[in-house]
Image: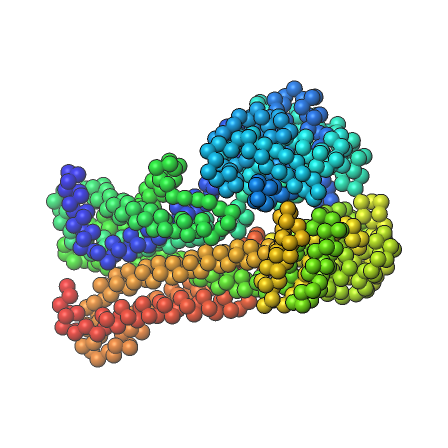
């Protein structure tokens, strides 16, 4: 029985090679994209699950109310860590984490790496794979734990780096640390992926001279609570410390504390735009949703193709069905036969899809610097289960209608010739209409996102990021020395110093005007800074050199602040910073977009004039064609002046370049979606046209005998497809407009308003492609000798 079923199945599949190819090809591409989308989703879903105790770890966060809106923060006051450790019996472990800034020296190598100061129980709470050393040595202030990546790079040739010396360098500070252990770097979907070194938390007090009991200093605090039912009690107990915190930092008041579970923490931090989250976040929204949308659309298109081509294949076997029914085959047997053949087709598509995915997955992973996924079926049982379920659902859903439809024919009607095969019905027309509508949505999105990528590339961010280099300096003396060295370089147009830098460094502070209060970005700038970065003053003046009044009480604000506070004449307006510092507006600068990409809305900006002793950045401006050589000369000059200090010289537009990379990748995804959708729609149309021609072959012969021209026959046969395309164009372009707008709005704060061009382009492309497909197929049938057409049956 099984052998007979398989023989019939493969015999019929071999007789319909074109339709088999169409089904397998379309479904394999859709399944390959489903694999990419699943791995992409799994990357986010599995964030931090590698830690054994992940289910019982929580971060202590707080909520601050600003203008009646809650703002979540991923940090808490430093003293809270010891309070939690000493006063909450529900908590088994407490670990504080704080990132330390600085460079390291190993032998002659100077380098910068991420290092966290952590409490002694860090390696007990978070399970790291220790290659060398023991976690207990973290309690020693002179020990440092490094990743295997760092060990291989700077202790090459040393089998066990434990005991080797690394020198921590921060300004004039030098701290000798010996390697206490080497850990295997966690996977990229881990909170601590970016960190390559850890030292005892107490080191932070030597570096910064902070007071451990100062409530105005914030760090990240994790707690381990074995019983999830105790979380509410801990959150309730934290309420008593809200007032203490608010008295210590009146300009940054806490509404309440809450515990954020480690599982899913990174995803929520990205989704909720969590402030002061200093760790590795999950995928950006754009990277998280794009593959899923692409996979869903392609799978729908492939299923529509599958159904239509399955009907075409089944209708060609209508006489076989009649004979089998006469010989005693029941309807259940026929349905099983057709569904079984569909399952075989789906299985072949799955094999092909996995092969295609083996190329797509690494290509997709390489597109994003923050993503690392790989296709390994032997180590990913969940993926195998997902594909198996997807395979069955696709085969059953897409193949059920043809099986039930054809098996319902009566044998008498078939054998008498009353039951005709071929042709198209309302259901098939509906499927094709939806298929083309989805294709137009995909093509519309590809044009819309391509145009948006170009729009964002040229978006005015308020300063000349592509003509500026910045260098980090430790103090005023270092700034002056380096500035004097660069002063003889004729390619440098201007040099200026600052405490902060656009696109790299700023901080948030609450600002108040009368009853209104907002969090604002704050930049400390020096002489000539606005000129150096190419910012534009739209009202008022720049700061006056060495003017103490400007240092103490003046500010330059951006246009967004003027809009928020509703000022008609901003010059001279008085704002309060931290509720205690009055500042008077002396100038208004054109809006400066500080973030790399246009993900977030423009925020109010406060610029304060700082003296040279507060400088931590040196900025230089040069012509675009000279920038590369200027950077080389800056690096050479730094090495000559400060041989024991690592140079930190960067292009100002590096963050913008990263954002452009993300935007370009999103464009590539949607262009790919549009192209594949077109291909799937065309082959689906080919199937339906072929099926229609089968039924009307004799009609074509009669028309030719009666004198009909080939153009006339083509027009007559293609009329139904033109109507389908027209309806699909209306549905698809309208849906494409709203879906593209919705997706762009969920990704970016600023994006290109959708105009008429995506409508025209998407509809024109689909009409052109379909006209070629339909015209070519019908022209071939209309060109046949009418004698052959009339003999067809």
Residue 120: percent from left, percent from top: 61, 26
- Residue 235: tell me if it is visible: yes
> In this view of the protein, which residue sits in the foreground, 285 or 468?
468
Q: Is residue 599 left or right of residue 4?
A: right
Q: Identify the residue at image location x=20%, y=51%.
A: 13
Q: Residue 504 or 133: which is nearer the viewer?
A: 133
Residue found at the far left of this picture: 327
Residue shown at the point (44%, 60%) measured from the top left: 671
Q: In the image as oriented, which residue stretches furthest toward the top?
A: 89
Question: Does 378 appear above or below 544?
Answer: above
Q: Residue 791, image x and y in percent?
A: 13, 68
| Quadrant, the N terminus | top left
* Horizontal relation, residue 690 to residue 278: left or right: left
Q: Nearer the viewer, residue 168 or 781?
A: 168
| Above or below for 687 versus 710 | above
Total marks placed: 0
The chosen color scheme is rainbow
Quadrant placement of the C terminus: bottom left
- Residue extending farthest right: 549
Residue 556 coordinates in the image, percent (x, y): 79, 58
Apparent side of residue 191 relative to residue 541 in the rendered image (left or right): left
Residue name at image x 37 percent, y 36 percent: 379
- Whether residue 767 sits left or right of residue 760 in the image: it is left
Q: Which residue corresponds to the image point at 49% horizontal and 50% vertical from the top-left?
A: 368
Image location of residue 649, percent across then percent down: 62, 54
Q: Is residue 561 visible?
A: no
Task: Quadrant for residue 84, please give it.
Answer: top right
- What is the quadrant of residue 332 in the picture? top left
């Amino acid at each position: 029985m099984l052998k007979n079923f398989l023989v019939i199945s493969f015999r019929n599949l071999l007789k319909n090679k074109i339709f088999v190819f169409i089904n397998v090809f379309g479904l394999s591409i859709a399944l390959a994209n489903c694999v990419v989308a699943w791995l992409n989703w799994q990357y986010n879903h599995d964030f931090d699950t590698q830690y054994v105790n992940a289910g019982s770890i929580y971060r202590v966060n707080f909520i601050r109310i600003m203008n009646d809106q809650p703002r979540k923060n991923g940090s808490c006051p430093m003293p809270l860590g010891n309070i939690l450790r000493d006063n909450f019996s529900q908590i088994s472990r407490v670990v504080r984490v704080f990132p330390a800034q600085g460079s390291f020296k190993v032998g002659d190598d100077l380098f910068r790496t991420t290092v966290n100061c952590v409490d002694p129980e860090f390696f007990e709470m978070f399970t790291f794979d220790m290659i060398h050393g023991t976690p207990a040595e973290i309690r020693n202030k002179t020990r440092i734990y490094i990743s295997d990546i760092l060990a291989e790079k700077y202790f090459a040739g040393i089998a066990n780096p434990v005991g080797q010396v690394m020198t921590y360098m921060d300004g004039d500070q030098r701290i000798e640390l010996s390697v206490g252990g080497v850990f295997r770097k966690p996977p990229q979907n881990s909170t601590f992926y970016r960190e390559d070194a850890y030292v005892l938390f107490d080191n932070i007090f030597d570096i910064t001279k902070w007071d451990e009991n100062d409530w105005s200093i914030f760090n990240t605090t994790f707690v381990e609570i074995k019983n999830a039912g105790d979380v509410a009690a801990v959150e309730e107990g934290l309420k008593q410390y809200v007032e203490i915190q608010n008295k210590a930092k009146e300009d940054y008041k806490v509404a309440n504390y809450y515990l954020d579970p480690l599982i899913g923490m990174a995803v929520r931090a990205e989704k909720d735009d969590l402030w002061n989250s200093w760790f590795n976040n999950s995928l950006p929204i754009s990277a998280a949703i794009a593959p899923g949308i692409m996979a869903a659309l392609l799978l729908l298109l492939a299923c529509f193709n599958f159904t239509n081509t399955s009907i075409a294949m089944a209708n060609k076997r209508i006489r076989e069905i009649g004979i089998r029914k006469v010989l005693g085959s029941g309807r259940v047997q026929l349905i099983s036969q057709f569904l079984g053949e569909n399952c075989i087709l789906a299985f072949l598509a799955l094999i092909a899809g996995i092969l295609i995915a083996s190329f797509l997955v690494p290509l997709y992973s390489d597109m994003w610097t923050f993503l690392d996924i790989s296709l390994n079926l032997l180590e990913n049982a969940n993926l195998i289960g997902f594909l198996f379920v997807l395979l069955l659902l696709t085969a059953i859903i897409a193949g059920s209608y043809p099986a039930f439809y054809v098996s319902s024919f009566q044998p008498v009607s078939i054998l008498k010739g009353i039951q005709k095969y071929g042709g198209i019905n309302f259901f098939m027309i509906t499927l094709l209409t939806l298929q083309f509508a989805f294709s137009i949505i995909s093509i519309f999105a590809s044009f819309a996102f391509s145009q948006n990528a170009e729009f964002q590339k040229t978006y005015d961010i308020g300063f000349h990021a592509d003509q500026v280099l910045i260098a980090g300096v430790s103090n005023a003396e270092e700034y002056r020395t380096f500035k004097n060295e660069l002063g003889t370089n004729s390619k440098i147009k201007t040099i200026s110093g600052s405490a902060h830098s656009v696109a790299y460094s700023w901080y948030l502070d609450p600002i108040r005007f009368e009853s209104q209060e907002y969090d604002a970005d704050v930049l400390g700038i020096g002489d000539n800074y606005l000129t150096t970065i190419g910012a534009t003053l739209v009202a008022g003046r720049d700061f006056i050199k060495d003017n103490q009044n400007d240092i103490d009480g003046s500010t330059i604000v951006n246009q967004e602040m003027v809009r928020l506070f509703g000022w008609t004449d901003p010059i001279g307006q008085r704002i309060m910073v931290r509720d205690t510092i009055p500042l008077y507006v002396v100038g208004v600068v054109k809006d400066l977009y500080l973030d790399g990409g246009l993900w977030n809305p423009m925020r109010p900006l406060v610029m304060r004039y700082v003296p040279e002793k507060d400088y931590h950045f040196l900025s230089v401006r040069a012509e675009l064609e000279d920038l590369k050589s200027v950077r080389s000369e800056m690096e050479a000059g730094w090495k000559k002046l400060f041989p024991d200090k690592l140079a930190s010289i960067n292009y100002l537009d590096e963050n913008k370049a990263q954002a452009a990379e993300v935007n370009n990748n999103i464009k590539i995804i949607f262009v790919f979606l549009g192209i594949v959708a077109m291909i799937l729609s065309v082959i689906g149309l080919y199937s339906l046209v072929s099926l229609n021609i089968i039924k009307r072959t004799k009609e074509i012969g009669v028309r030719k005998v009666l004198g009909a021209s080939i153009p006339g026959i083509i027009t007559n046969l293609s009329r139904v497809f033109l109507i389908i395309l027209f309806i699909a164009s209306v549905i698809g372009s309208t849906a494409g407009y709203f879906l593209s707008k919705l997706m762009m709005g969920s990704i970016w704060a600023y994006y290109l308003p959708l105009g008429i061009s995506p409508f025209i382009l998407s509809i024109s492309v689909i009409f052109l492609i379909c006209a070629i497909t339909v015209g070519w197929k019908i022209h071939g049938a209309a060109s046949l000798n009418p004698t052959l057409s009339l003999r067809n049956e």
